Amino acid sequence: MLPLIDKATRELLLANGCEPERDHRPVLKLFNPAGPATWLVCAMETNGDTLYGLCDLGFAEPELGYVSLEELREVSAGLAIGLERDLSFRGKHPISAYAEAARVAGRIVEDTDALRAAMGRVSSRSPR
C-alpha cells in the first residue's frame, strides 16, 4: 500500500501552507475506493498534520476545511481496502473552483465544463 502522501507532495503542500491567502490548486486527491469519501488537498500546515482542502464525505455537502492527516491514516487503517491516492490527479483549477463546482453538484466533480463554469462564478464574485 502506498503512503497517503509522498515526500515530493508533502513538500509542495507545506510550501502552499506557507501562503494561506493564495487560492492554490489541489495537489493531492485521496479517496475511499469502497465508498463515496473524497478529499482534494491543497496545503499542509507546518505541524505536518493539518491539511486544508475540499472534503466530501458523501453526504451531498462538500466543504472547504481542515482535516488531520493522522485521522485520515486511522480511517484508512480501519477500512478493508484503505484510502487511496489518485496518482493520475492533476489539479487544473484553484481550490475555490472545485469547491464551487462541488457546491452546485453536491459532490466533488472533475468535469471540465463544470469547473470552467465554476471558475466564471468565482471570478465574478472576486473583488477587483
Image (cartoon, grey):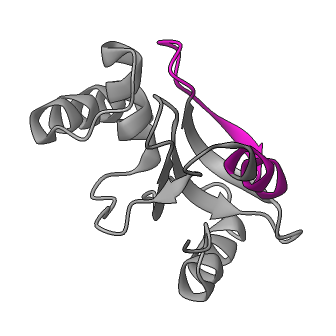
Q: Position of residue 102 (x, y in %)?
A: 38, 25
Residue 14 spot, x, y in % from top left: 69, 74
Left or right: 79 as drawn, with respect to 113? right
Magenta-drawn stretch contains 58: yes
Please give the name of the residue rendered at 29% of the width and 33% of the height, measured from the top-left corner: 109
For residue 104, side relative to residue 53 (left or right): left
- Residue 40 point in image, percent of width and height: 49, 48
Which one is in front, 30 or 32?
Answer: 32
Image quarter hosting the C terminus: top left
Task: Please indicate whether residue 23 sits to the left or right of residue 72 in the image.
Answer: left
The image shows residue 30 at horizontal and vertical percentages of: 51, 52
Q: Is residue 61 left or right of residue 116?
A: right
Residue that lies at the very extreme toward the front in this rendered image: 80
| Residue sitting farthest toward the left | 113
- Whether residue 128 is visible, yes or no, is no
Q: Residue at x 61, y 66 (%)?
A: 4
- Note whether 6 is above or below 50 in the view shown: below
Tell me: residue 19, above or below residue 78.
Answer: below
Quarter assignment of residue 2: bottom right
> What residue lies at 55% left-to-right and 78% top-to-bottom?
9
Q: Is residue 77 magenta?
A: no
Quadrant of the rendering where the N terminus is positioned: bottom right
Of 101 and 85, which appears nearest the observer?
A: 85
Q: Nearer the viewer, residue 110 or 6?
A: 6
Give the magenta-colored segment's residue range: 57-76
Q: Residue at x 82, y 70 (%)?
A: 48
